Each structure stands twice: as structure tokens, then as C-alpha cells.
Amino acid sequence: MDQSSPLTDKEKKVIQGSWAKIYPKSDDVGMTSIISLFTKYPQTKQYFSQFKQIQNPEELKGTAPLRKQAHTIMTALNKMVENLGNSDVVASEMNALGKSHAQAHKVDPMYFKIMSGVIMEVLGEEFPEAMTPDVVAAWTRFWAMFCSGVTAVYDKVGWTKVAA
């Protein structure tokens, strides 16, 4: 099946069912994901003014700025997951994220794919029983749809890469 085709009803249910297990700990997932992102891809810190000077990402554990950023990411993800049956809400969220990251934050869109991969790794580590092959496949399709949608917004707003 084409990765960019719309999610099936079954995939939506699988994603929402797994998210129901994950959501109570979503802020923790977000914090772990950000620390992992900065550890594996240290160049990503440049996009976060509050984290630029941190040498060791482990120093961020439990800090208020990390909690706030994690909550922001997970709130956006939750909004999309809860509304998988309403493509207008999902598109609106992708549009807002794409515009803000292209225009205000100047984040290369490739980092959405990288971050989605990091989140998937964390979910696999933290929720191995929930991340069955069917669940992983559905989430992989969700992230492909998400990254494609956000990249389309970048194209629409005329984003051009800014040298770091």
C-alpha cells in the first residue's frame, strides 16, 4: 500500500487504540524523545533556543523547558490522533505546524521524519507490548502521511532552506 495514501479505518482504530495506552505517559514519551533526538542528532538543538547551550542532553531530564516542549509536541500529536476521523482537523494541525516551523522556526522539514522515527523508537522501548507489528505498521503510515502533509505546507509557503 502507498505510504502516502489515506489511513484506512482499521489503521485509525489501531493507532487510536495504542494511543489510549500511551497517552497517560505521553509527556514522558515526549521528554525521552527530545533527549534522544538531541543525543542522536545534536545539530537539532540549534532549532531550540532554550536548549542550544546544553552540552549533555541528559542534563535536561526533568527541567521545566523540556517538560513544556514535550507537552507541546505531544498535545499536537494527541489532537491529530484523536481526530483521525476528521481530516479537516488533522490538516489544520499539519498546516499550523508546517507554517510555524517553516516561517518562524526555520526548521528543515527533514527533521519531522527524524523526530517521528525517534518517537517510534521510544514507543517501542517504553511500550513493547502495545507496539505490535500491526500497530507499528499503522503508526509508520501515520508518520508518512504526517511528514508528507507538513512538507506540502512548506512547499505551499515557499520555504527555502536557510543555512545553519
Image (cartoon, helix red, strand yellow):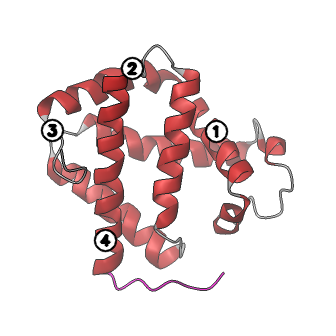
Q: Dividing the image into 4 quarters, which one contains the N terminus? A: top left
Q: Which residue is mark 4?
A: 153
Which residue is label 1 attached to?
Answer: 31
Q: Residue at x 14, y 36 (%)?
A: 8
Mark 3 and mark 2 lie on one chain; the one further toward the N terminus is: 3
Q: Is residue 163 magenta?
A: yes
The kind of secondary structure element at disc 3 is loop
- Pick whichever, 141 or 97, lies toward us: 141
Kindly state the secondary structure of the residue where label 4 is placed.
helix
Region of the chain picked out in magenta, as a range: 157-164
**Quick check: 20 left or right of 90?**
right
Q: Which mark is residue 85?
A: 3
- Cβ–Cβ under 8 Å for marks 1 and 2: no
**Residue 90 visible to an observer of this rendering:** yes
Of labels 4 and 2, the one closer to you: 2
Which x, y percent locates residue 17?
30, 21
Spatial CA distance of label 4 from label 2 is: 31 Å
Q: Give the residue number, with chain letter if any, for mark 2.
A: 132
Rendering quarter of residue 78: top left
Q: Secondary structure at mark 1?
A: helix
* Residue 56, label in figure: none
Q: Is residue 90 above or below residue 50?
A: above
Distance from disc 1 to disc 4, alpha carbons, whole Å, reads 26 Å
Q: Quadrant of the C terminus?
A: bottom right
What is the CA distance from the residue labelled 1 to the residue labelled 3?
A: 28 Å
Q: Residues within 10 Å of mark 3 (few under 14, many from 20)?
A: some
Contact between marks 1 and 3 (CB within 8 A): the answer is: no
Residue 72 position within the rendered picture, expressed as x and y whole percent measured from the top left: 51, 47
The mark nearer the N terminus, 1 or 2, is 1
Q: Earlier in the sequence, mark 1 or mark 3?
A: 1
